[in-house]
Amino acid sequence: MSDPDPKRQMQELEAKLAAHKAANKADKAHQEEHYSQAQIAWRMVTEMVAGLGIGFGIGYGLDWLFGTTPWLMVLFTLLGVAAGINVMLRTAKEVQRQTEMPPKTGGDEGNKNGD
């Protein structure tokens, strides 16, 4: 039995690794896109809840300070909801602008249908 050439073995291993990476590249891009969509959704939910919570907190604090129990809390809660919706719409416009821009890297595969 003869000893195999280590350089040849290394080249074969590198070729196998390159083929495996190329095969899994499309799957990884899809997973990253899905993660990005989930991240955007959670960002929007967080913005909405933050606006609601801040409005409620300010209204409750002012009600406690002035003794106008439900009125300022209701008013500032509604203002907080409006602010949360406004921030969500700004985020949606930002995401839309980013998706309308062409990709910066080469490789235009799988992006021909405009979705």
Image: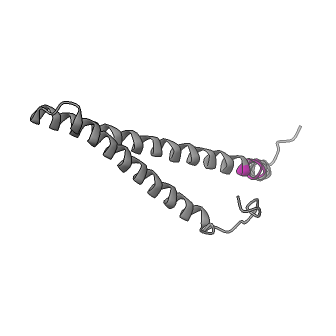
- Could you tell whether 29 is left or right of 61 in the image? right
Query: Residue 109 occupies which quadrant of the picture?
Result: bottom right
Check the image and name the residue furthest to the right.
1
Confirm whether the magenta stretch covers residue 42: no
At 46% from the left and 41% from the top, the residue drawn is 45
Q: Main secondary structure of the magenta part?
A: helix
| Colour pattern | one colour
**Vertical comparison of 17 with 65: above or below:** below
Can residue 54 be seen from the camera position used here? no
Residue 75 as seen in the image, left or right of residue 22: left
- Percent from the top left, x then y, of residue 26? 73, 51
Residue drawn at 46 percent across, 45 percent down: 43
Image spot of residue 89 (x, y percent): 47, 55
96 with respect to 75 (left or right):
right
Is 83 or 93 nearer to us in this picture?
A: 83
| Residue appearing at x 76%, y 59% in the figure | 110
In this rendered view, identify the residue nearer to me: 65 or 53: 65
The picture quadrant where one finds residue 114 is bottom right
* Magenta stretch: includes residue 21: yes
Q: Which range is magenta?
A: 17-26
* Quadrant holding the N terminus: top right
Which residue, as the protein is rendered here, is positioned at the far left?
66
Report the residue at 76% width, 64% height from top.
112
Q: Is residue 25 visible?
A: yes
Q: Give the total number of marks visible in the rendering.
A: 0
**Residue 32 rendering spot, x and y as whole percentages:** 61, 48
Side of 41 relative to 10 (left or right): left
Q: Nearer the viewer, residue 42 or 4?
A: 42
Where does the image place residue 63, in percent across and percent down from the top left?
A: 16, 34
Dividing the image into 4 quarters, which one contains the C terminus?
bottom right
